[in-house]
């Protein structure tokens, strides 16, 4: 089972406002190794498919509009217990409720525009990573 990597997105609000560099620095300082990374603008279909589990929820349409509003940075992050450890450094979904020092507390501006995505299980990390990256785009030291 995948325990060693997670999948992350720097969301459009953070890319647009120049927070890509500072967020990457926090990811590196957290001990994560970036093993794949690309900037991409999601299509509506891609965003809907990525967030399919939230289809029908009241925030779904807004989330899709937001996630397709500009480029995002997608990446695979390597770390022991990567999924759990990355969820710790990003903090709660609602930046207002996130612990001080977390990425969402520092760069999130609302529940929707919470700066980053992190997979919620090793299984989802594996499927999200392969949604964006083929094997030869993934590097390991
Ligand atoms: P997560 O990103 O912390 O796993 P999820 O509940 O899986 O949180 O929601 C996915 C994304 O949908 C969130 O990161 C956020 O951008 C958005 N979202 C979740 N709940 C709300 C809400 O109540 N209002 C607006 N946007 C929301
Ligand atoms: Mg989630």
Image (cartoon, rainbow, N blue to C red):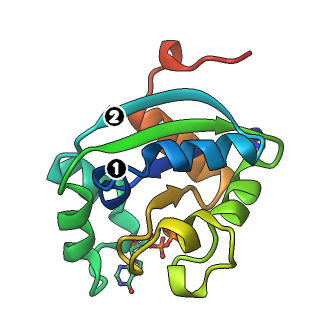
Mark 1: few, some, or many residues within 10 Å (few <14, many ≥20)? some
Left or right for 125, reference 42: right
Q: Residue furthest right?
A: 80
Above or below, 113 relative to 15: below
Q: Are marks 2 and 1 in contact (CB under 8 Å)?
A: yes
Q: Residue at horizontal 76%, vertical 38%?
A: 4
Instruction: Classify residue 51 by image quadrant.
Output: bottom left
Q: Is residue 5 visible?
A: no
Q: Residue 71: x and y, percent? A: 25, 44
Image quarter for residue 85? bottom right
Q: On the rendered structure, is 16 left or right of 74? A: left
Residue 15, disc: 1
Q: Residues within 10 Å of mark 2 (few under 14, many from 20)?
A: few
According to the image, label 2 marks what residue? 39
Element type at marker 2?
Answer: strand
Q: Residue at x 52, y 79 (%)?
A: 95
Q: Number of callouts in the render? A: 2
The image quadrant of residue 60 is bottom left
Could you tell me residue 122's position as x and y percent?
Answer: 67, 50
Classify the position of the C terminus by image quarter: top right
Residue 71 in view (yes/no): yes
Depth check: 131 or 17 in front? 17
Please give left or right for residue 16 compared with residue 120 in the image. Answer: left
Horizontal relation, residue 33 to residue 132: left or right: right
Looking at the image, which is closer to me, 132 or 98?
98
Where residue 14 appears, as percent x and y from the top left, is 38, 57
Q: Residue at left 45%, top 21%?
A: 134
* SS for dot 1: helix
Mark 2 to mark 1 CA distance (whole Å): 10 Å
């Amino acid at each position: 089972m995948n325990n060693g990597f997670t999948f992350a997105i720097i969301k459009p609000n953070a890319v647009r406002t120049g927070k890509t560099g500072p967020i990457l620095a926090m990811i590196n300082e957290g001990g994560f190794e970036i093993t794949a990374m690309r900037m991409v603008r999601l299509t509506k279909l891609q965003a809907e498919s990525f967030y399919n589990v939230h289809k029908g929820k009241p925030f779904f349409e807004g989330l899709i509009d937001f996630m397709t509003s500009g480029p995002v940075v997608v990446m695979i992050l390597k770390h022991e217990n990567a999924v759990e450890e990355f969820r710790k450094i990003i903090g709660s979904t609602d930046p207002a409720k996130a612990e001080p020092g977390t990425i969402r507390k520092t760069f999130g501006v609302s529940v929707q525009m919470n700066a980053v995505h992190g997979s919620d299980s090793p299984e989802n990390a594996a499927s999200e990573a392969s949604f964006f990256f083929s094997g030869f785009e993934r590097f390991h030291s």
